[in-house]
Amino acid sequence: MNTKISRTLGINGFGRIGKLSLWHHAGRKYFDTIVVNVGRKVGTSFQDIIHYLERDTTYGRLDSFLYGHKAQNVISDVDEQSASLTINGVKVKLLRNNRNPKNIEWAKYNAKIVVDTTGQFLDPSLGPDAPKGSIRGHIEAGAQKVVASAPFKLKEGVAMPEDAVTTVMGINEGDYDPLKHAIISNASCTTTCLSHMIKPLLDFFSIKRVLSASMATVHAATGSQQVLDRLPKTGARDLRKNRSIMNNIILTTTGAAKALQLVIPEMSTIGFIAESVRIPTATGSLIILVMNFQEELNKKPIRRDMINSIYENAAKTNTNGYLMYSDNQNVSSDIIGTPRAAAVIEGYETHTRTGAININLEHVRGIDKNILEMITDQVTSIQVTQAVIYGWYDNEMASYVNMLGDRVVSVAEDMH
């Protein structure tokens, strides 16, 4: 006799990623029960949470998101007394009392796996009793596994704990060891897209042919930005974060380069620069990736068609749908809602340019001086091809939350 396993998911935080994760799992129905820790009172009544839950400016109504034009109301059994409801047949319990992870009642509700979407608890080296809270507090509160929806942030010089790991689905999800790791970072939306753009090129050319690389993400606004100009907080150094995102292109930073090395370690052997620009759109972002490759004698030169064919073939063999290739002339809104695509390669805009670089061997590290004296001309020329590749990603639901959902379910599968 087959007995269905009861599965409960905990979600900590009910901002953009928390809310959209609830949408994802309500549609997926892998978990029977979802416990959402809002962490505070909302509005004037329980109905105000329902109002927030069922509507979204970017993705529309929850019922239409799940069932399109055939949609009917998917929220039922609303009980304000117990702070519970049912969404699409999935039971949902809302907690509104505790913000510190160690005080959330995960054990009471048998939530053995928790996804933390707050962006506040990202240092796995901190103990559960850290004054401002810690991601380990979830384990203290009864969870067995915690998935963070952002990259880890450790203090300079602090080593990554042995029970923590960073993974991107389709890249290095196998690095997660269910017997060893209790805390998993799902990296960021930008790192997720970037890693899926870089890996096909490394698989084809190998890291040895990569001389340098850089990227810039043209990124949609996030909840941490200001609608109108605002006076900076005490000690604030980046004054641009307090300027209106509705009216400005804002230069900012990204940790994608650092996080990339955690999921594709060989990238640490080359110089890699990552920059970010925020623009006034709700979602739909773009990575402009620049890779410099050394041409090799007696090998086919690297050209636009070669780069595009690498991505086309990778997309065809990528059965999970995380990488897509497009010959269309896309704009950012075309990417919103593209299911599970970590990166959509804009093949129409791929560019390559080959040129010669002169290198003075006298300044190359590791060449014996005796050998240099035997060389008449110490300046040599090498052929280098620079490739520019564009990759779209829906930084909220489609690219990131859907892949976060895949990571959470894969971790849960290993727990049963």
Image: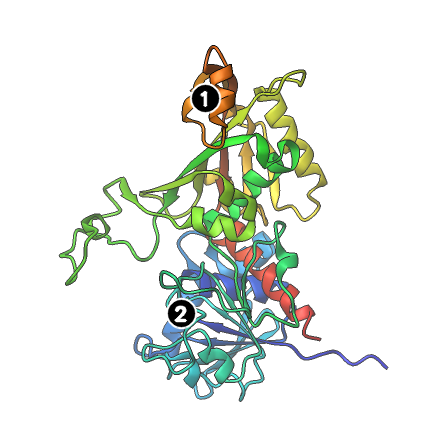
- Image: 326 above or below 108: above
Left or right of residue 72, residue 320 in this image: right
Q: Quadrant of residue 145?
A: bottom right
Q: Identity of the amino acid at label 2?
A: Phe
Q: Secondary structure at mark 1?
A: helix
Give the Cα distance between marks 2 and 1: 48 Å
Give the quadrant of the N terminus. Answer: bottom right
> In x, y percent, where is residue 98?
38, 82
Where, by quadrant of the figure, is residue 3 drawn? bottom right
Q: Kindly state the secondary structure of the residue where label 2 is placed.
A: loop
339 vs 81: above or below:
above
* Quadrant the C terminus occupies: bottom right
| First in sequence: mark 2 vs mark 1 | 2
| Outermost top residue | 376
Could you tell me which residue is drawn at 71 percent across and 45 percent down?
Answer: 319
- Residue at 39% across / 72% down in the picture? 49
13 on left or right of 244: right
Relative image position of residue 327 (x, y in whole percent): 58, 27
Q: Nearer the viewer, mark 2 or mark 1?
A: 1
- Between residue 373 and residue 326, name the one nearer to us: 373
Residue at (49, 48) in percent of width and height: 260
Q: Amino acid at mark 1?
A: Leu
Residue 361: mark: 1
Could one spot residue 385 in this view of the protein?
no
Q: Are marks 2 and 1 in contact (CB under 8 Å)?
A: no
| Residue 82 against residue 55 in the figure, above or below | below
> Residue 245 appears at what percent x and percent y?
26, 47
Q: Residue furthest front?
A: 370
Residue 121 bears which disc, if any?
2
**10 Å crowding of disc 2: few (<14), some (14-19), many (20+):** many
